[in-house]
Image: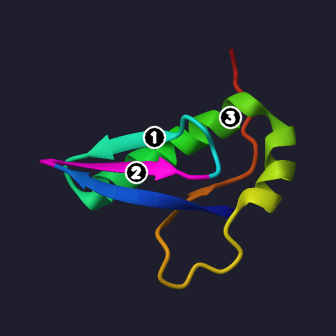
């Protein structure tokens, strides 16, 4: 499991989470928890599409020690069944 640092922004009634190391990985929600959950789902979808090579890169992009830092996690490559 890898941890990716995120930027969390409150925009009006919404919370927007950007996964900093993965271009285009942005999600929102009505609460911080919902936005982080949606960002994790978006990141996992990207990992699933990118294939096993992404996880090798993930080790370099992921957060090494995250005390006090917001993050989302992505697990191992999950092949798509389509």
Q: Could you tell whether 49 is left or right of 59 in the image?
A: left
x, y (%) of residue 76? 74, 50
Question: Would residue 15 be counted in the magenta stretch?
Answer: yes
- Of mark 3 and mark 2, the one earlier in the sequence is 2
Q: Residues within 10 Å of mark 3 (few under 14, many from 20)?
A: some
Q: Could you tell whether 19 is left or right of 2 in the image?
A: left
x, y (%) of residue 19? 53, 50
On residue 26, the disc is 1
Quadrant holding the N terminus: bottom right
Q: Residues within 10 Å of mark 2 (few under 14, many from 20)?
A: many
Residue that mark 3 sits on: 48
Q: Are marks 3 and 2 in contact (CB under 8 Å)?
A: no
Q: Could you tell whether 71 is left or right of 8 in the image?
A: right
Q: Could you tell whether 6 is left or right of 61 in the image?
A: left
In which quarter of the view is residue 82 placed?
A: top right
Q: Residue furthest bottom?
A: 67
Q: What is the magenta range?
A: 12-20
- Of mark 1 and mark 2, the one earlier in the sequence is 2
For numbered disc 3, what is the local secondary structure?
helix
Q: Nearer the viewer, residue 59 or 78?
A: 59
For numbered disc 1, what is the local secondary structure?
strand
Give the Cα separation between the discs numbered 3 and 2: 20 Å
Residue that mark 2 sits on: 17
């Amino acid at each position: 499991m890898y941890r990716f640092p995120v930027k969390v922004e409150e925009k009006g009634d919404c919370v927007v989470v950007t996964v900093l190391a993965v271009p285009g990985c942005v999600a929102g929600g009505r609460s911080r928890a919902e936005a982080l959950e949606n960002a994790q789902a978006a990141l996992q979808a990207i990992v699933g599409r990118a294939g096993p090579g992404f996880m090798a890169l993930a080790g370099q992009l992921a957060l090494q020690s995250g005390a006090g830092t917001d993050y989302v996690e992505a697990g191992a490559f999950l092949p798509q069944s389509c």
